[in-house]
Amino acid sequence: MNTFRLLSLLLLPLAVSAAVPAGDFVESHDTTYNSLTVERRGNLVEMRARARGSEALESAIDLNDPLRLVVHYTRSLYGALFIQPQPKRVLMIGLGGAGFHRLFAASYPDSLLHTVELDAKVLELCERRMGFTPTAKTPVTIMDGRMFVKRNKEQWDWLILDAFRGGFVPPHLKTEEFYRECAARLTDRGVFVSNLHATSQLYFSDLKTIRAVFPQVVLFETLGRGNVIAVAVKYKDPIITDPAKWPTAEALTLPIHAGRLDLKEVRNELTLFPSDRMKTARVLTDDFAPVEFLDTLKANNTDAKK
């Protein structure tokens, strides 16, 4: 049996997990990789990561409607549907609280959504405190995302990069070399999807690095949230940058999306490249990836507040 498939199956619970315990709570956990806070207030449970003296929201779940996409950028991830509307096999790097996973699994029950998560504690909290139960269609592998991509030779229709540690992505998941490894794992019409923060100088290097690997890229900006979702492909034809050639939002919308996912709104998030700002940005490589340094500089190139 494939090593990765075996590890994933070992992580599956033997029975349906118990419901999240009743009552509000706040708890903190320090691991090798993260400093995490999980808090419940009423029907909402949040997972946050502490770094640089502040907390970044990683994920949130509405226990009254687990399919609702509470964190806005998770809705923008579905912009990938306009480019590849048949996500039969999806690899997601970064689990968080599995806020994206539940609606996806309900929308595409025959599809595989395989998640790679570095921190075993994240999976434990996701199951115990946020009510997520991995299944054969939503397995979770505990491993470094780049190592998984390098070793696992399977092909994916969507490959989603959403691996944050306290508000920033580990540098080895930001380089040209890694993106080339990701491109090699895509099907012929597969898409690479990356959650970017547009509030610092890192954003411009992010875009320049993605463009160095993928000949076509479109951007969806989660308005007012600081997130931009890059959707990129490894082919030059057909053209994906003309939205007039995309499937309509109506054609992609499923009954289960009602009140949870408005693909017309996602389509309207399409935004332009900041081409002028990218001219002076440097491509990030394994030998040059000052991710944390660039992420401390605001997008207007002034020092962030101490």
Image (cartoon, grey):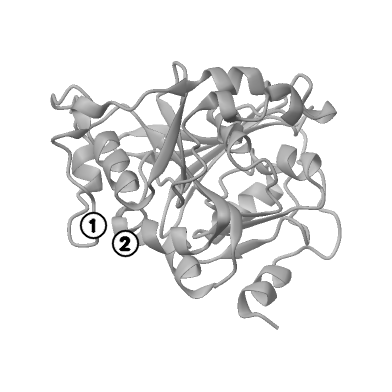
Kindly identify which numbered label has been placed on residue 119: none
Question: In this figure, what is the number of numbered marks?
Answer: 2
Kindly identify which numbered label has been placed on residue 285: 1
Q: Which amino acid type corresponds to the residue marked 2 in the rendered image?
A: Glu
264 and 229: which is toward the camera: 264
Is any atom of residue 226 visible in this view?
yes
- On screen, residue 250 versus residue 34, left or right, reads right
Establish if 149 lies above or below 57. Answer: below
The residue drawn where x is 30% and y is 55% is 175
Label 1: element kind: loop
Q: Quadrant of residue 274?
A: top left
Q: Which residue is mark 2?
A: 177
Q: Position of residue 17 (x, y in %)?
A: 81, 53
Q: Quadrant of residue 116?
A: bottom right
Q: Which amino acid type corresponds to the residue marked 1 in the rendered image?
A: Thr
Q: Residues within 10 Å of mark 2 (few under 14, many from 20)?
A: some
Q: Are marks 2 and 1 in contact (CB under 8 Å)?
A: yes
- On screen, residue 4 versus residue 297, left or right, reads right
81 and 247: which is toward the camera: 247
The residue drawn where x is 39% and y is 49% is 214
- On screen, residue 138 versus residue 91, left or right, reads right
Establish if 291 lies above or below 22. Answer: below
Position of the C terminus, as image quadrant, is top left
- On screen, residue 185 versus residue 140, left or right, reads left
Label 2: element kind: helix
Cα distance in 3D space between marks 2 and 1 = 6 Å
